[in-house]
Every structure is written in structure tokens, then in C-alpha cells.
Image: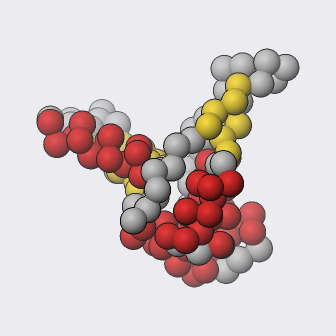
Amino acid sequence: MSLNIQLTFTRHKTLNKAKYIKCYLKPEQRRALIRDTSDQASMLYEYYLNMVSIEDNVISDEKSAAYFGWTVDKAKRHRITLENAGYFEVDRFRGVGRNGSVGCVYLIGKEAIADHSSKTKKI
């Protein structure tokens, strides 16, 4: 049985208030994440949390591999571990028509994935 992981957000007043958000896990949340995945997958998860504060950032295996000094295959393996454990998901969308927008939504955390899934099922 896994514990619910809740993110803690801290907004820093001295920095850009509109864009900088520091996300971190409490020790018991980090232990639950490591227990469900692995220690390196938890490092990747926290890297994804830090990427939340960067606007229009594309999360890719290549970028995370370069950040940690890993191979792309290793970053992909740990991302898939997070996806299989339910901690990370990418929801890709494509708009309708010629000028339809294309993009994706990064869902980080079990609660975010469950909340997004329940909202998309209603539509």
C-alpha cells in the first residue's frame, strides 16, 4: 500500500513571485516514493518537480540525462518506472482544425494523475 504524496509549495517573495515555486517532498513522502520506485527514480521525480517553476519547459529524457550525467536509456528507464508506479504521466493533446494547438500536460504525483483522470472521464 502506498502513501499519498502531497506536494508542498513555497513561494519566495524576494524572487519573481509569479513564476518561482519551490516544490519539495517531506522525508516520509520521499521514503514512500523510494519504496515504490527506486532511489534514482526519486531523484528524477524531484528533478521534474523543480522543472514545474520553469515556464514552457519541455521535459525530455535527453535533458534529464544531461542534468544527471546519465545515458538517455537510463533516464528513460527511470521515467518509465515512475509512470508504471503512477507518479508521472504525460497527457498529449491536439486541437481541432488547421490552427489547432498541439501540446502536452505533465502530471507529476499520484493525486495530480487521479484528479486529471477523473476530470477527463467526465468530458
Q: Residue 78 in the image: x percent, y percent?
A: 55, 73
Q: Nearer the viewer, residue 54 or 80?
A: 80
Residue drawn 59% across the image and 75% down it = 38
User: How far across and how far down the image is residue 68, in percent?
Assistant: 75, 69
Residue extending furthest toward the left: 122
Residue 30 visible (yes or no): yes
Residue in the foreground of this view, choosing between 58 and 81? 81
Q: For the N terminus, which image quadrant?
A: bottom left
90 left or right, relative to 98: right
Quarter of the picture containing the C terminus is top left
x and y percent of residue 96 in the render?
Answer: 21, 37
> In this view of the protein, which residue sits in the foreground, 33 or 88?
33
- Residue at image location 32% in from the left, 47% down from the top: 114
- Is 55 left, or right, of 3 in this rendering? right
Instruction: Name which residue lies at 45% across and 51% down.
Output: 4
Task: Tell which residue pokes out farthest to the right in this image.
Answer: 14
Q: Quadrant of residue 102?
A: top left
Q: Quadrant of residue 67?
A: bottom right
